[in-house]
């Protein structure tokens, strides 16, 4: 039986059993809470934390709050547990907790030795002074499920929204520590441990955010890249049966959706064996042994050995990829996101989804010819056969012969003239063809599917594209969380932050000031329409967030761009926001996203 058929059988016929889940894991700890605390102290039952006040931001900050028992030793690859009691003194919450062990993506160079500590399940709270029943923004960091941390300062976006909400940033296990899969892990522990960490952090918010002045019924979860991908997975968690128990709204920025295989499929199993071998627990050691399994060997290994093994396996894969990723487990993730979203098996009520115009450049190697392109496709889509490759290339037709890698590059308008099918600010020819294939399959189409899934019934789904050159993956984060860059005009930053703030406060991202020019092609404006359009058929209206004006400069050192790229900086930058047809955008992006969703059996996403 070939691999393609095995994947199809897994996704179609596996009988899922939803694991028992504790909806109030902190309830018994809250009984330990006491009154009579000093200013800036909060009693979580299991511990007392004392925060600090920032006189310039007027925020009370609590950094390094432990929300789970350290997942070390026998707790490796187990579901996170609530912390043990530690009430002997007030813990000073003035510095961030340890970062989780880091693993970089595969690519040129080995990179630094892995850093971080397994004892890393901490979160941070940014609360306006005297806060009462404020909405809450939860930020989940990105990093390919292999690196990143929760140290992003949320003060900037809170301040720019009149201190009208509370911010929470969280950490979760990464790399092999958080996303090791395989049958042995499933039987002896848990797969998707990093997602379960996030889930417990969201339960912590429900249990404790009132102590900081937050309203647990008005939580918005958010993230960029793998953080956005994580949000997407919480949107579909437990088959969409959670309702609004953990969050009401969600925001995804370029949600990362790599291939999501079944936990015991060939690819995650090979990653498991590679990790075991790198960690000194080779499969042949356990074969026929009654004393210790591979899993038991891994649990007993020292942390430094495991960190190095996680890093080494991750960097040995396909360019721009990570080895340890979320898997379909039959419980937390019962199906692939594309199919769950199509069936609208979702949690929460409202969603704001975005992507960047140049989402792929960090993740695609140099590609000059169609032979290069075909070879790359075989690597990144291992279930494809030759007829599948032909079908894919028909969706992304070849650029004209006269267009070469050295041809003039420019950012497209999206709906007039040439499109992302053959040109961008960073590439033309086969390189751009590869960029567009990767961007749409991995970041852009998931953002479409999310906005579409929430645009029905009582739910509301909104969509935007961030197009400010260079518009690389993740570059939008600086505009809404800060610090803004020279190519971000002050009006753009203010508008983008208000879009997020309005959605957090009122579940609607519409804005009517800050210099936003919402002109439609027919001459009407968003302020006249009164609302940001929902992402509904037939045109699936979305907002293209761009700028005009400014001073042109040339910049170098951008990924996969061995040449200067023209971009615009202050002064003179003005907002250029347009309502556009998302389905026709970039030469029929909606049709291509339908194509990707329809081939889920060989591209399980």
Image (cartoon, helix red, strand yellow):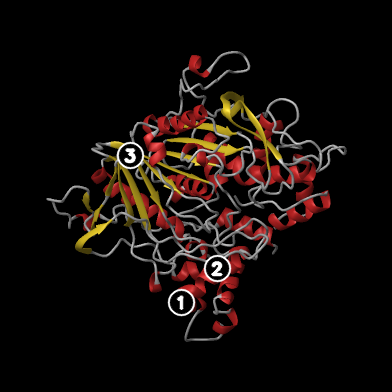
In the image, residue 327 sits, relative to residue 439, either above or below, namely below
Q: Residue furthest left?
A: 36
Residue 48 placed where, x, y %?
22, 56
Q: Position of residue 592 (x, y in %)?
A: 68, 38
Image quarter of residue 414: top right
> Which quarter of the figure has residue 564?
top right
Disc 1 target residue: 302
- Which residue is disc 2 drawn over? 113
The span from disc 1 to disc 3 (Cα, nearest Å) is 44 Å
Residue nearer the viewer, 52 or 389: 52
**Residue under numbered circle 3:** 56
- Within 10 Å of disc 3 (Cα), the crowding (few <14, some 14-19, many 20+) is few
* Image: 292 above or below 55: below
Q: Position of residue 227 (x, y in %)?
A: 49, 48
Q: Is residue 11 above or below residue 467?
A: below
The tag on residue 590 is: none
Cα distance in 3D space between marks 2 and 3: 37 Å
Task: Give neighbour class at mark 1: few <14, some 14-19, many 20+ (Cα, 10 Å).
Answer: few
Q: Is residue 538 visible?
A: no
Judged from the image, the secondary structure of the residue bearing numbered disc 1 is loop
Q: Is residue 243 left or right of residue 566?
A: left
First-in-chain label (1 vs 2): 2
Q: Earlier in the sequence, mark 1 or mark 3?
A: 3
Left or right for 353, reference 409:
left
């Amino acid at each position: 039986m070939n691999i393609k058929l095995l994947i199809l059988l897994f996704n179609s016929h596996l009988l899922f059993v939803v694991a028992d889940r504790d909806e109030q894991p902190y309830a018994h700890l809250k009984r330990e809470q006491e009154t009579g605390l000093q200013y800036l102290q909060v009693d979580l039952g299991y511990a007392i934390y004392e925060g600090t006040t920032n006189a310039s931001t007027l925020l009370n900050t609590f950094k390094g709050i432990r929300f789970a028992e350290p997942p070390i030793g026998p707790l490796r690859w187990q579901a996170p547990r609530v912390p043990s009691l530690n009430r002997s003194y007030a813990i000073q919450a003035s510095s961030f907790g340890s970062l989780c062990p880091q693993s970089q993506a595969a690519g040129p160079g080995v990179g630094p030795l892995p850093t971080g500590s397994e004892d890393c399940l901490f979160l941070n709270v940014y609360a306006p002074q005297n806060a009462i029943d404020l909405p809450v923004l939860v930020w989940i960091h990105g990093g390919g499920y292999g690196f990143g941390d929760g140290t992003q300062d949320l003060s900037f976006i809170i301040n720019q929204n009149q201190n009208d909400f509370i911010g929470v940033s969280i950490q979760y296990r990464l790399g092999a520590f958080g996303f090791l899969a395989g049958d042995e892990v499933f039987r002896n522990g848990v797969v998707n441990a990093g997602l379960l960490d996030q889930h417990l952090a969201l339960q912590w918010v429900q249990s404790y955010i009132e102590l900081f002045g937050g309203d647990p019924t008005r939580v918005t979860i958010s993230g960029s890249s793998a953080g956005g991908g994580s949000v997407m997975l919480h949107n579909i968690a437990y088959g969409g049966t959670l309702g609004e128990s953990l969050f009401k709204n969600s925001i995804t920025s370029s949600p990362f959706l790599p291939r999501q295989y079944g936990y015991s499929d060939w690819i995650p199993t090979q990653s498991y064996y590679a990790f075991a071998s790198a960690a000194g627990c080779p499969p042949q050691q356990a074969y026929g042994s009654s004393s210790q399994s591979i899993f038991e060997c891994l649990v007993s290994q020292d942390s430094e050995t495991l960190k190095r093994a996680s890093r080494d396996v991750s960097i040995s894969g396909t360019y721009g990829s990570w080895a340890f990723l979320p898997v379909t487990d039959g419980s937390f993730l019962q199906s692939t996101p594309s199919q769950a979203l199509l069936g609208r098996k979702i949690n929460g009520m409202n969603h704001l989804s975005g992507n960047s115009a140049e989402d792929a450049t960090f993740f695609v190697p140099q590609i000059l010819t169609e032979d290069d392109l075909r070879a790359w496709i075989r690597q990144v889509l291992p279930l494809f056969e030759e007829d599948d490759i032909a079908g894919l290339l028909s969706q992304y037709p070849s650029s004209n012969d006269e267009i070469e890698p050295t041809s003039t590059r420019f950012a497209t308008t999206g709906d007039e003239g040439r499109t992302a099918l053959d040109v961008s600010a960073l590439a033309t020819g086969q390189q751009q063809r590869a960029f567009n294939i990767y961007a749409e399959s991995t970041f852009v189409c998931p953002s479409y599917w999310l906005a579409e899934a929430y645009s029905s019934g009582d739910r509301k789904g909104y969509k935007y594209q961030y197009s400010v050159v260079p518009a690389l993956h993740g570059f939008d984060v600086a505009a809404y969380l800060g610090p803004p860059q020279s190519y971000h005009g002050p009006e753009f930053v203010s508008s983008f932050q208000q879009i997020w703030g309005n959605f957090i406060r009122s579940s609607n991202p519409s804005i009517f000031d800050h210099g936003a020019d919402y002109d439609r092609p027919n001459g009407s404006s968003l302020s006249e329409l009164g609302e940001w359009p929902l992402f509904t058929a037939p045109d699936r209206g979305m907002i293209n967030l761009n700028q005009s004006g400014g001073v042109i400069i040339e910049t170098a050192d951008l990924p996969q761009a061995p040449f200067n790229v023209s971009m615009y900086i202050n002064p003179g930058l003005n907002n250029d926001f347009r309502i556009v047809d998302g389905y026709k955008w970039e030469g029929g992006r909606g049709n291509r996203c339908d194509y990707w969703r329809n081939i889920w059996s060989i591209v399980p996403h």
